[in-house]
Amino acid sequence: MNVKKIVLAYSGGLDTSVILKWLAEEYDSVVIAYAADIGQEEDWQSVIAKGIATGAEKVVISDLKKEFVEDYIFPAFRANAIYEGSYLLGTSLARPLIAKEQVRIAEAEGADALSHGATGKGNDQVRFEMGYIALNPKLKIIAPWRIWDLNSRTKLMEFAEKRNIPIPVSKKKPYSSDGNLLHVSFEGGMLEDPWREPDEEMFKLTVSPEAAPDKPIYVELEFQGGSPVAIDGVRLEPLALFTQLNKLGGMNGIGRLDMVENRFVGMKSRGVYETPGGTILRAAHGDLESITLDREVMRIRDSLVSRYSELIYNGFWFSPEREYLQSTMDACQSTVNGVVKLKLYKGNCLPVGRKSDQSLYQESYATFEEDDVFNQADAGGFIRLNSLRMRIQALQRL
């Protein structure tokens, strides 16, 4: 492949440091190292220094936190997105944003190729490359893990040592992790044994439920158009609001998940996740919908959630079908306005109150006390009509 300038999705770790040098040598090309700040804890000055020392022409750090919350997290949570009933798509939502910015940088810098450090076994290679192709199919794609022979940590270390690539000198973690504003994920190493419980020391965003406060915390979360706008009556911008939800969830041990999921490439994979703010947001949003969405609208929307979530997980964020489903999901959110009261206690997030000016809940109809709006005798005909087909079937057997 003949390329002149490559933009590499770069973290500064062993893999992408080696890839940076390998790309420059293998393709005799200029390499721009690009890192996305999506809320992970990182020493960005160190990342810049390491990238330049490894041979990058320049290192670009893009602050994408605000865009991540407003244009990726909140839209997905308006749709109640969840993969295989548990996973709140923290990594899946971040990858298309990273890819979008990488394409923008390539176009601005006159680059003709993109590269990433995802392996041939995982989902991220699909998510990155689907994004590249959807946004600019003219850019060439280089996936080193699919073409080189540096297929072990030992070989990567040897490559780095021979070329004086600065790499951290530390004990290898017994797992790998990846973080952003929405979550931290852990996989590999000791976690490849699905029977082994994760070590408590592993978790970064949440205290253990056992160590959480002994008294519950009550929080009121206000929504407009299906997106949160205020906590305890204080209006906040999306980034500040979601950051606060993360803190509230983390201090109360909320949002831990241990699951075996089905990767898009076909294999099962054990992942452990921390999603404190997202867990609170999803619980509150769903609860508010219980009083503001029509029953049949909710049933149709819920029938689409699995498909919508799979599209995100499998890397189709920029596909026309995901965009169509997003517009469908958002269309029913105009009435999702109101406040939900939540009780946070030792890993539990319990909605305990909800109110809305557009509530479809009417106490005068639902009450068990005497009322003058519902004729209970009407229920007889309702039951007879709904049971008619079963009556006919039963008569055939008698």
Image (spheres, helix red, strand yellow):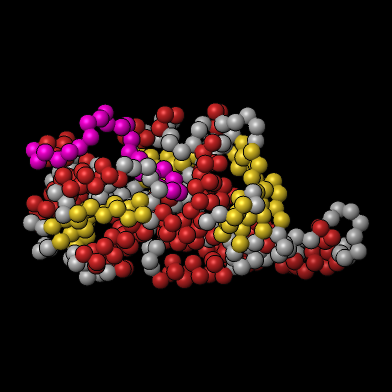
Please indicate whether residue 108 sits to the left or right of residue 161 in the image.
Answer: right
Residue 173 included in the magenta stretch of the image: yes
Please determine whether, in this image, residue 386 is positioned above or below residue 171. Answer: below
Vertical order, 35 against 218 (above or below):
below
Q: Position of residue 134 (x, y in %)?
A: 31, 68
- Residue 128 at x, y percent in the picture: 30, 58
Q: Main secondary structure of the magenta part?
A: loop
Residue 176 highlighted magenta (yes or no)? yes
Which residue is depicted at the point 40% across and 71% down?
320
Closest to the observer, 245 or 209:
245
Is 376 displayed left or right of 126 in the figure? right
User: Where 168 falls versus 261 (above or below)?
Assistant: above
Residue 26 in view here: yes
Report x, y in % for residue 292. 68, 62
In percent of the image, x 67 and y 58: which residue is there?
338
Q: Quadrant of residue 103?
A: bottom left
Q: Which quarter of the figure has residue 194?
A: top left
The residue sitting at 79% across, 61% down in the picture is 362
Q: Quadrant of the N terminus?
A: bottom left
Residue 228: % across, % down = 57, 56
User: Which residue is painted at 77% across and 69% down in the image?
Assistant: 385
* Residue 218 placement: quadrant: top right
Quarter the C terminus occupies: bottom right
Disc tally is: 0
Q: Is residue 264 visible?
A: no
- Residue 377 lies left or right of residue 64; in this view the side is right
- Specify the segment rendered in magenta: 162-184
